[in-house]
Image (tube, helix red, strand yellow):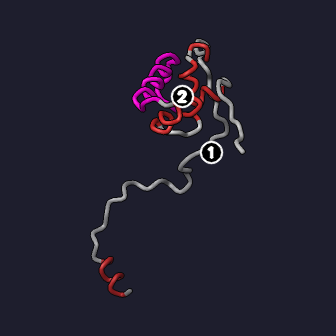
Amino acid sequence: MDSLRTSTRHLPARDAGPALPPSRPIARPCRRVVFQIPPAVTSDRLSKRELDVLALLASGKTDAQIAARLAISPRTVSTHISNMLNKTGFSNRMQLVVWAFAAEVINLVAQR
Protein backbone atom coordinates (compact mmCIF):
# COMPACT_ATOMS: atom_id res chain seq x y z
CA MET A 1 0.00 0.00 0.00
CA ASP A 2 2.87 2.38 0.81
CA SER A 3 4.40 1.75 -2.63
CA LEU A 4 1.11 2.77 -4.26
CA ARG A 5 0.98 5.99 -2.25
CA THR A 6 4.60 6.72 -3.05
CA SER A 7 4.14 6.16 -6.78
CA THR A 8 1.07 8.39 -6.99
CA ARG A 9 2.83 11.28 -5.29
CA HIS A 10 5.21 11.61 -8.22
CA LEU A 11 2.54 11.91 -10.92
CA PRO A 12 2.40 15.27 -12.68
CA ALA A 13 -0.53 17.47 -11.71
CA ARG A 14 -3.26 17.84 -14.33
CA ASP A 15 -4.98 21.07 -15.12
CA ALA A 16 -8.57 20.52 -14.01
CA GLY A 17 -9.72 23.80 -15.48
CA PRO A 18 -11.58 26.52 -13.62
CA ALA A 19 -13.58 25.35 -10.63
CA LEU A 20 -17.24 26.27 -10.29
CA PRO A 21 -18.05 28.56 -7.42
CA PRO A 22 -19.52 26.52 -4.56
CA SER A 23 -22.68 28.63 -4.39
CA ARG A 24 -23.58 28.02 -8.05
CA PRO A 25 -25.57 24.84 -8.76
CA ILE A 26 -24.32 22.62 -11.56
CA ALA A 27 -27.81 21.98 -12.93
CA ARG A 28 -31.30 23.10 -12.12
CA PRO A 29 -34.04 20.52 -11.70
CA CYS A 30 -36.49 20.30 -14.57
CA ARG A 31 -39.98 21.10 -13.36
CA ARG A 32 -41.99 20.37 -16.47
CA VAL A 33 -41.35 19.15 -19.97
CA VAL A 34 -43.63 20.49 -22.65
CA PHE A 35 -43.84 18.80 -26.01
CA GLN A 36 -45.78 20.66 -28.65
CA ILE A 37 -47.16 18.74 -31.57
CA PRO A 38 -46.96 20.64 -34.83
CA PRO A 39 -50.52 21.10 -36.11
CA ALA A 40 -49.67 19.71 -39.54
CA VAL A 41 -48.46 16.43 -38.07
CA THR A 42 -51.14 13.76 -38.02
CA SER A 43 -50.97 10.00 -37.81
CA ASP A 44 -53.18 9.56 -40.88
CA ARG A 45 -50.16 10.52 -42.99
CA LEU A 46 -48.38 7.35 -41.84
CA SER A 47 -48.97 3.98 -43.51
CA LYS A 48 -50.08 0.91 -41.58
CA ARG A 49 -46.60 -0.58 -41.90
CA GLU A 50 -44.97 2.64 -40.69
CA LEU A 51 -47.25 2.56 -37.64
CA ASP A 52 -46.21 -1.05 -36.99
CA VAL A 53 -42.55 -0.02 -37.15
CA LEU A 54 -43.24 2.99 -34.93
CA ALA A 55 -44.93 0.88 -32.26
CA LEU A 56 -41.99 -1.53 -32.14
CA LEU A 57 -39.52 1.35 -32.16
CA ALA A 58 -41.35 2.91 -29.20
CA SER A 59 -41.14 -0.37 -27.33
CA GLY A 60 -37.35 -0.14 -27.48
CA LYS A 61 -36.65 -2.61 -30.28
CA THR A 62 -33.61 -2.22 -32.53
CA ASP A 63 -33.88 -2.11 -36.32
CA ALA A 64 -32.78 -5.75 -36.49
CA GLN A 65 -35.39 -6.83 -33.92
CA ILE A 66 -38.14 -4.88 -35.72
CA ALA A 67 -37.07 -6.46 -39.03
CA ALA A 68 -37.21 -9.96 -37.57
CA ARG A 69 -40.62 -9.33 -36.00
CA LEU A 70 -42.14 -7.93 -39.20
CA ALA A 71 -40.28 -10.26 -41.59
CA ILE A 72 -38.62 -7.41 -43.48
CA SER A 73 -34.99 -6.36 -43.84
CA PRO A 74 -33.30 -3.95 -41.42
CA ARG A 75 -32.74 -1.61 -44.38
CA THR A 76 -36.51 -1.53 -44.98
CA VAL A 77 -37.03 -0.65 -41.30
CA SER A 78 -34.56 2.24 -41.68
CA THR A 79 -36.41 3.37 -44.80
CA HIS A 80 -39.76 3.34 -42.98
CA ILE A 81 -38.27 5.39 -40.14
CA SER A 82 -36.71 7.83 -42.59
CA ASN A 83 -40.06 8.21 -44.37
CA MET A 84 -41.83 8.86 -41.05
CA LEU A 85 -39.25 11.51 -40.13
CA ASN A 86 -39.75 13.20 -43.51
CA LYS A 87 -43.55 13.09 -43.23
CA THR A 88 -43.62 14.48 -39.69
CA GLY A 89 -40.74 16.92 -39.97
CA PHE A 90 -38.92 15.56 -36.92
CA SER A 91 -35.16 15.17 -36.99
CA ASN A 92 -34.65 12.03 -34.91
CA ARG A 93 -36.29 8.84 -33.68
CA MET A 94 -36.74 10.11 -30.14
CA GLN A 95 -38.85 13.05 -31.29
CA LEU A 96 -40.90 10.68 -33.41
CA VAL A 97 -41.58 8.34 -30.47
CA VAL A 98 -42.37 11.17 -28.05
CA TRP A 99 -44.82 12.61 -30.57
CA ALA A 100 -46.42 9.21 -31.08
CA PHE A 101 -47.14 8.90 -27.35
CA ALA A 102 -48.20 12.54 -26.94
CA ALA A 103 -50.57 12.40 -29.93
CA GLU A 104 -51.82 9.00 -28.78
CA VAL A 105 -50.79 7.43 -32.06
CA ILE A 106 -49.49 4.57 -29.93
CA ASN A 107 -50.33 3.65 -26.35
CA LEU A 108 -48.56 1.82 -23.57
CA VAL A 109 -50.06 -1.60 -22.99
CA ALA A 110 -49.01 -3.78 -20.09
CA GLN A 111 -48.03 -7.25 -21.23
CA ARG A 112 -48.64 -10.26 -19.02
Residue range of the region highlighted in magenta in the rendering: 72-94
What is the secondary structure assignment of the residue under circle 1? loop
Quadrant of the image containing the N terminus: bottom left
Q: State yes or no: residue 102 in magenta.
A: no
**Which labelled disc corresponds to residue 53?**
2
Q: Residues within 10 Å of mark 2 (few under 14, many from 20)?
A: many
What is the secondary structure assignment of the residue under circle 2? helix
The mark nearer the N terminus, 2 or 1, is 1
**Which labelled disc corresponds to residue 29?**
1
Between 40 and 97, the one lying in front of the other is 97
Q: Amino acid at mark 1?
A: Pro
Instruction: Check whether the beta carbons of the residues at disc 2 and disc 1 lie within 8 A of each other.
Output: no
Task: Say which of marks 2 and 1 sits in front.
Answer: 2
Q: State yes or no: residue 88 in magenta.
A: yes
**Which labelled disc corresponds to residue 4?**
none
Q: Main secondary structure of the magenta part?
A: helix
Residue 80 versus residue 10 in the image, above or below = above
Q: Residue at x 50, y 23 (%)?
A: 90
Question: Which quarter of the figure has residue 75?
Answer: top left
In the rendered structure, the answer to whether residue 74 lies left or right of residue 3 reads right
- 3D distance between C-alphas at marks 2 and 1: 34 Å
Residue 22 versus residue 92 in the image, above or below = below
Quadrant of the image containing the C terminus: top right
x, y percentage for residue 57?
54, 34
x, y percentage for residue 61?
53, 39
Q: Residue furthest bottom?
A: 2
Between 7 and 87, the one lying in front of the other is 87
x, y percentage for residue 22?
53, 57
Q: Amino acid at mark 2?
A: Val
Between 35 and 63, the one lying in front of the other is 63
